[in-house]
Image (cartoon, grey):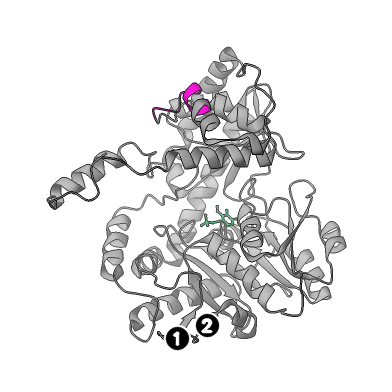
Amino acid sequence: MTDALPEKGVPGEQILAELQELRAGDLPTHGGRLFAYVYDPALDGLDDLARAAHATSAHVNGLDPTAFPSLLAMENALVGAAARLLGGGPATVGSVTSGGTESLILAVKAARDAHPDIRSPRLLVPSTAHAAFAKAAHYLRVEFDVVPVTDLRADPRAMAAAVTPDTVLIAASAPSYAHGVVDPIPEIAAIAAEHGVRFHVDACFGGWILPYLRRLGADLPDFDLSVPGVTSISADLHKYAYAPKGVSILLHASEELRRPQYFAHADWPGYTMINPVISSTRSGGPIAAAYATLRSIGDTGYLDLARKTRESVAVLAAAVEATDGVRLYAPTETSVVCLASDGVDLFVLADELAARGWHTQPQMAHADHPPTIHLTVTAAVHATAASFAPDLAEAVAVARARGPIELPPLPPLTPEMVTPELIASLAEGLGLGAGDFTRMAAVNTILNAAPPALREAMLTGFLSLLQRPTVR
Ligand SMILES: Cc1ncc(COP(=O)(O)O)c(C=O)c1O
């Protein structure tokens, strides 16, 4: 690795070449063969436009909209577009945040701070809710009530039974990330309204595609602010709005509901700090890039991208159904294909798919759920979907021939036993020392066998091992 602080500055061309070389080691962000982390509309010229827009505002600071009204105008335009798409009314207000996790943390903060009288506030979610809610509960010291789902969906009766006088927020997904299914939002909204509790719809993942899938005829429930009882909703622009990373929208049904989201502090000798979101100084770059992306694609453009995504999902799902050894684990009602094993080791299969250029996301067993493979499908997959079936069939055949991973007996471990030394030797033993993450079946098998707390400790240790300063 080169030195980030050379004695003398290095020419720009050389630096860009170095960046290109570094990027060459990444998974492909474009090309419709990576089914997690990235969202690719495969639209010519869009990257260049977003890059140019980002550059116009990269140094603008969202800290003070009176100093930089350009950002305020773009934020208000983005919030207005989201409100229109997601069933907002004349009272709807919102904020631009840096991502889904920040939107969810702020929805929880607003709900918590609306009830200073409740000493031990509680957040109620179905077990399929995104991990970011657990993070919000942890950061904000809110009790976290998790209710089991029925057939992958939140169970309204079980949710109703779990509401307590201290519940400040109920949340559900539209759709869930792991399985791509939409929770019964109207039913849960009615329960929330009956109890006078706020209800947040986490549409971070699907908020910019569900409305278009519905327009295309998909049979999906109402899920947005038009549903009585829904008090807030989040939708990430860096997911199905195809904006570069760093932008999500959090909408509230009214100004009064948003008010406790703000943080204000005047009691120090510097400027009065008023923050609607977690960051104070914020780059205008991602906001300008998102604004440019939305304006460039437009409503009919998003409809077309949703159509391509929907058709791709159908092609991939048919491939899974036609392949002995795997089965669909969840209904393919949105933009996710989630498959389970029907006689093949899924972690070996994921490696074999990767060897054929298809990068999927293994999901570990959890509660009643077996391990699964997750595919987030975007419009770019339209160009590649047809070639998935033969590669899947071949990968399954090879995975079958290889058989499941056989691990040497490991000593029973508890999270407390996970030391940096243990992680370093495990990583070395599993061949991760050299930074090659292409053969992950053994690692995934170990993680899958570990209870969640041990898995957390091992992966935290591993990330910490990776995150070491470059020493020269
Ligand atoms: C349903 C859902 N909510 C929240 C998030 C968190 O979003 P981010 O990774 O942008 O923080 C995700 C991310 O995949 C998601 O799918």
Q: Position of residue 235 (x, y in %)?
A: 55, 64
Please indicate, yes or no, whether residue 349 appears anywhere in the rendered image.
no
Task: Name above or below for residue 370 compared with residue 136.
Answer: above
Residue position marked by numbered label 1 in the rendering = 272
Q: Position of residue 392 (x, y in %)?
A: 53, 26
Compare residues 170 and 119 and report the one nearer the observer: 119
Compare residues 76 and 219 and report the one nearer the observer: 76
The amino acid at mark 1 is Thr
Residue position marked by numbered label 2 in the rendering = 264
Q: Note whether ligand 1 is within 8 Å of mark 1.
A: no
In terms of image quarters, where does ligand 1 lie?
Answer: bottom right
Q: Which stretch appears magenta?
A: 426-434
Compare residues 325 and 100 and report the one nearer the observer: 100
Classify the position of the N terminus by image quarter: top left
The amino acid at mark 2 is Ala
**CB under 8 Å between callouts 2 and 1?**
yes
Picture quadrant of residue 198: bottom right
Residue 429 magenta:
yes
Looking at the rendered structure, the secondary structure element under dot 1 is loop
Callout count: 2
* Label 2 crowd bin: few (<14), some (14–19), many (20+), radius 10 Å: few
At 64% from the left edge and 23% from the top edge, which residue is drawn? 325
Q: Note whether ligand 1 is within 8 Å of mark 2.
A: no
At 31% from the left edge and 53% from the top edge, which residue is drawn? 44
